[in-house]
Image: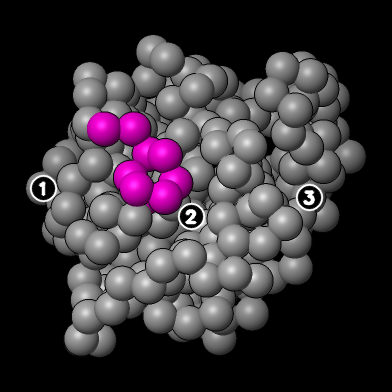
Amino acid sequence: MRLLSRLRGPRRNGADASVEISEQDGIRYLHLGSATIQSGMRVSDPDDLVLAYTRSMMAFLLFAPEPQRVVSVGLGGGSVNKWIYRHFPQAEQVAIELNPRVIAVARQYFQVPADNARLQVVQADGARWVAEHSDSADLVLVDGYDGESHAAELATPEFYGAVARALRRDGILAVNLWGSDRQFDEYVHRIEAAFEGQVACVPALQKGNIIVLAFKRRPLSLRWDELRERAKLLEARYGLEFVRFVEGLRRLNPHTDKHLLI
């Protein structure tokens, strides 16, 4: 793996984490202070979702197929933002990133677009920003990691409560968590408390990651036959593994033969 660049600073908190970029077999990777891969980009197709967990985060489309106002906490290499930017030109996105080095690297090495009417990248504390913007999004995406662990301030009961208030009537939260994290169950319980138990888990198509979906209001259609049909249409349109997402929902969540229970 070839190291392309290293931007270092004092390691006091997430705003100061060092940033490294490497490349192997046509894939460019972002690292934050460790060898752990935070983001990946296929150099020949910058908008492709290379990492399986980023594809699994798109499982929200099974329940909200036309996102209009998207807030993402944690930019990384901007993989999810670029994919949404490409496929949903009507959507307005705000990406909140604490580390200014990450923003600079995302723009220089990962082809994140410059700010415009469809995408704004804000250098700010994500937890504070969300708490200050109630009723501001119909989709909130949270992927807040440094090189070692989930950012603690993005997993508190207060943060998840603020996300619930930031979401509009039919809003959805999608959180990337590590299933091996010792606090995984506690994080899920906190999300359930903030969203009145209206939560479902989707295993990422790679070992370790689990995407937690939380709903401001219970989705109307939770029949397996309808979810599978929707998945087939989405898979044909976007080329992502939506049928497997539905299989994962069935495996990880309470259900009957006919319905997903949320």
Query: In x, y percent, where is residue 211?
Result: 59, 55
165 or 236: nearer the eye? 236
The residue sitting at 57% across, 55% down in the picture is 28
Query: In x, y percent, where is residue 145?
Result: 42, 69
Quarter where residue 256 is shown: top right
Task: Report the quarter where the N terminus lies.
Answer: bottom right
Q: CA distance from mark 1 to mark 3?
A: 34 Å
Q: Which numbered circle lies on residue 47?
A: none
What type is the residue that disc 1 sits on?
Glu
Is 13 on the left or on the right of 261, as rendered? left
Query: In x, y percent, where is residue 15?
Result: 21, 71
Q: Secondary structure at mark 2?
A: strand
What type is the residue that disc 3 sits on?
Gly
Start-end of magenta stretch: 106-114
Q: Residues within 10 Å of mark 3 (few under 14, many from 20)?
A: some
Task: Give yes or no for residue 120 being in the magenta stretch.
Answer: no
Mark 2 sits on what residue? 175
Q: Residues within 10 Å of mark 1 (few under 14, many from 20)?
A: few
What type is the residue that disc 2 sits on?
Val
Query: In x, y percent, where is residue 259?
Result: 77, 35
Give the mark nearer the N terminus: 1 vs 3: 1
Is 221 on the left or on the right of 119, as rendered? right
In this rendering, the answer to whether 206 lies above or below 229 is below
Task: Report the quarter where the C terminus lies.
Answer: top right
The way the protein has been coloured in the rendering is one colour
106 or 167: nearer the eye? 106
Mark 3 sits on what residue? 248
In this rendering, the answer to whether 95 lies above or below 222 is below
Mark 1 sits on what residue? 132
- Residue 106 visible in this rendered orientation of the protein: yes
The residue sitting at 26% across, 32% down in the picture is 114
Task: Give yes or no for residue 108 being in the magenta stretch.
Answer: yes
